[in-house]
Image: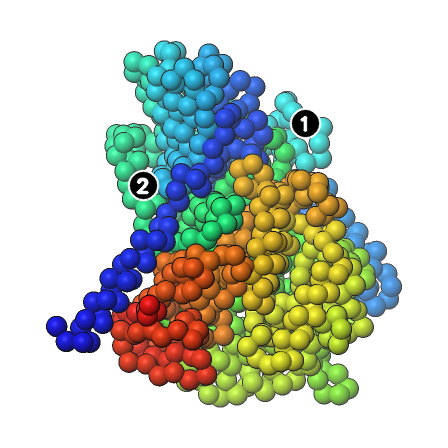
Amino acid sequence: MNKTSLLLLIAFLAALSCSKNVQTEPSAQQNLVFNELAQKWDEALPLGNGMLGCLIWEKEGKLRMSLDRADLWDLRPKENIDFDNWKFNDVYNYWKSDNYQTVLQEFDRPSNNYAAPTKIPAAALEIDISKLGKVKQATLDLSTASSIVEWENGARFTAFIHADKPIGWYRFENVPEGLETELIAPDYQGEREQQQSNQSLSKLGYPPGTIQKETNNITYTQEGWNNFTYEVHVQWQTGKNKMEGCWSVSSSKNKTAGISASEVASAEQLNGYNKAFETHKNWWKNYWSASSASIPDTLLQKQYYLEMYKFGAAARANTPPISLQAVWTADNGQIPPWKGDFHHDLNTQLSYWPSYAGNHLQLENGFVDWLWNNRPAFKKYTRDYFEVDGLNVPGVTTLDGEPMGGWIQYSMGQTVAAWLGHNFYQHWRYSMDRDFLATRTYPWLKEVALFFEQVSVTTESGMKKLKMSSSPEIYNNSAKAWFAETTNFDLALIRWTFEKAQECAQELGLNDEAQKWGDELKKWPDYATDPESGFMFAPGFPYNQSHRHFSHLLAFHPLGLVDFSNSENDRTLIKNTLKNLEANGSSQWTGYSFSWLGNLYARAFDGEKAADALRIFAECFCSKNSFHLNGDQCKAGHSNLTYRPFTLEGNFAFASAIQEMLLQSHTGKIAVFPALPADWKNAGFDKLRANGAFLVSAQMKDGKTQQVTIVAEKGGNLLLKNPFGDDEFSASTDYSFENNTIKVDTKEGETIRLTRKN
């Protein structure tokens, strides 16, 4: 064996050894384990497959399975949105005339009085467990995406939602005969709890549904608005000391499927629980094998796997995007918080952050496909409201992409489509799929750039600006929330759009178009900054109060227009901004603020503060089942807000922050372990995805990087910040070394192994 072959063998064995030290899937320590069933729906054990969802808890002595389906929506038009009579220019004119109260009355206040459009729940299944005695343990097993409840008398309940079929399963073992399943309809008639609330489901005005019960099966059919119907079906079999059942939910909205819930359940029951569970487990095994991470902080490690579990349960390529609560709509007789809609002023965007480095681009397809397919509705909205060409997206939308109104600075903001364009760009950069670039990313950015070109105005100095601008969600829903000068939030998204449109056009060889977008970029000013406090909200408006939404520093994260890698000026600006963020405190923050802060500190290479922010999120802003509850549940002074509406974006931003601590590549140069706390001496990750379609695995031991393995899916120029410091290392291929950067010209599918020499 020659020397080169020996080095390759050593590198391979080292890679194999290192990979064994990286946790490949959740362990039992990451599971949710309780000694009782939850008594509240938002503390329940969550199951899901992107389309169907289930929450398992106990209500009045019965085990309750709250059922949900992603496309169950009341889609009646918003009564107070009339684009025939109201345009963006009308809002501008009322604002300029100091008569903004008229705008509030037309657009905002009535929104609180209308129950729809809204996401709606499906139903619930209940089984009387009063005779089973005391619960010994209730578990959410992350590795198999299943729940297990065990009683002290030996009774056992298991349940799962099949990973890629519209079917849920449950099984009781070691139970007395006579156990039956009941189907409970949502409280659409207001005959039970919450009927007096303005947010009651009874406000939707639905007729009573029909429940048809036969031997060992129940079918519930509910009619909603405009002849929309959905069906819930459950059927079960009983044997000696056991019961086994399956359920499904179908929607008339899903016209292509054309199969009812009863047909799905009847067909799937022939396969049986065991066979279904095996194929279900295989899907999740593949999901967990796509990437993994090991960190020495047990709290953050567990929370990371809980977040990645929820992402796998909420996102699919062929389902609607992740809404505020995804497939876990409130089961409390009320309309879900914020109508369970799609908020695009940060909620949908943050929800997909972990899909990129987490190596789950296929699950992000559900989001970008939904955006792409709803372009006709978005373009109509752009023409009707803004009266210009190009593309913008309502900041708050229904399942069909229609505007829902609310605080119009954000629900009808001018840069919504730009931030959503970031998802298209990220998909291209992490996949290097040129077809996606040509048919999705660039066309989207081009249309948004055209919108900015037409909706903007030219100042006396010849520069461009917006007629009025906003910065979510500073000054809340008031006239003051509009700024006469373009905010840093809007400006960052506009500058980013023109820069990336130019970049993508150049990549596609469209040189004239690239020149056009480059020229447009030059017409926009630089950001409003203060020498001491860093990024401002807008010219003349410093960041001088606690605020939950870090809209003013979007140029830093996630857009990366301002970055530590650019210059000393950028580094100083970022440091001052974060210092000022700390100085103004977190009194008005919600949970997602802390998980976003973790990302910010990771980008600033401050692992200590990143970990601290994430610990606060995990300990004080999450329910027992890990759902993000927005307010400070510890009431420890982290926020003045202590309420508990459940949304998911904070959960998924947490996962992204852990990934940012382990791997960064937004500059085009890969950095492994860029932001770990000093006491994290042992850590590792496997197959995290980097810009350029590189899959990266790395292992750290005793504070030193031992080995890095990179698979070049598409080939190309690999730039890796030297992870070995002054230590010598070996490489499995030729490389050059310049400015502490390892450079390799990779071939498609090539694996590069770099190993520290002992």
Q: Residue at x 62, y 71 (%)?
A: 555
Say which residue label 1 marks: 195
How far from the left and from the top, in percent, is residue 309? 44, 45
Q: Quadrant of the C terminus?
A: bottom left
Q: Is residue 257 visible?
A: no
Q: Residue at x 50, y 84 (%)?
A: 514
How far from the left and from the top, in percent, is residue 375? 51, 63
Q: Give the camera-side residue of 54 and 636.
A: 636
Amino acid at dot 1: Gln
Mark 2: secondary structure:
helix
How far from the left and from the top, in percent, is residue 187? 59, 28
Mark 1: secondary structure:
loop
Q: Give the camera-side residue of 627 and 102.
A: 627
Quarter of the image for residue 520 reads bottom right
Q: Residue at x 44, y 66 (%)?
A: 672
In this picture, residue 231 sits left or right of residue 348: left
Q: Give the camera-side residue of 470 and 391.
A: 470
Whole-number angstrom distance, CA of label 2 to CA of label 1: 41 Å
Q: Residue furthest left?
A: 1
